[in-house]
Amino acid sequence: MELDPPHLKEYPGNFSYFWEKKNRSAVSPIRERPPKLPARRKPPPAPVVVDRQAADRLAVQIERREADKQQLEEALAAAYRKDDHQTGNHLARDLRRVNEEIERLYAEWGEMAL
């Protein structure tokens, strides 16, 4: 853009285009549009290679840990029903570890799917 009192001249394009047109306009006052550049396309995302066997092994691990979790929850409830708080506390600690492992396994499985 050039401020030339009292007129305002607009030059579409980059500085090189402006400079070329400015110097040419001193010779010829013809206003031209810059040539259109082809649109840039993003390259397609790289295909994700998933190790099917590793994903299946991970799914089996998750299923096993989910079954362990269910057993621990049932044992924990039974321990507290019997007022066996010491066993209940140990089971609660084990349940917390199993939950953390399940979260880790799901995160790993999710990364494989991406």
Image: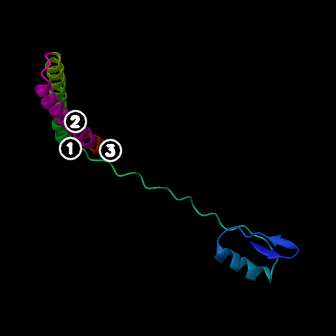
Residue drawn at 29 percent across, 41 percent down = 110
Spot occupied by residue 59 in the image (x, y as percentages of width and height): 20, 34
Give the residue pinned by disc 1.
51
Q: Nearer the viewer, residue 5 or 63?
A: 63
Name of the residue lying farthest toward the right: 6
CA gap, disc 2 and disc 1: 20 Å
Would residue 89 be counted in the magenta stretch?
A: yes
Give the residue pinned by disc 2.
102
Instruction: Indicate the quadrant containing the C terminus: top left, top right, bottom left or bottom right.
Output: top left
Spot occupied by residue 109 in the image (x, y as percentages of width and height): 25, 40
Instruction: Indicate the quadrant containing the N terminus: top left, top right, bottom left or bottom right.
Output: bottom right
Report helix, strand or loop for mark 3: loop
Q: Nearer the viewer, residue 47 or 69?
A: 69
Residue drawn at 80 percent across, 73 percent down = 30
Report helix, strand or loop for mark 2: helix
Spot occupied by residue 78 in the image (x, y as percentages of width and height): 15, 17
Q: In the displayed structure, would residue 19 be above or below residue 49?
A: below
What kind of residue is marked 1?
Answer: Asp
Pointer 3 with pointer 2, Cβ within 8 A: no
Spot occupied by residue 27 in the image (x, y as percentages of width and height): 80, 83
If you read the primary sequence from the N terminus, does the residue marked by circle 3 or circle 2 appear first?
Answer: 2
Report helix, strand or loop for mark 1: loop
SS assignment for the magenta stretch, majority: helix
Q: Which mark is on residue 36?
A: none
Would residue 102 be counted in the magenta stretch?
A: yes
Q: Nearer the viewer, residue 67 or 27?
A: 67
Magenta-tinted stretch: 82-108
Residue drawn at 30 percent across, 47 percent down = 48
What kind of residue is marked 3?
Answer: Leu
Give the residue pinned by disc 3.
114
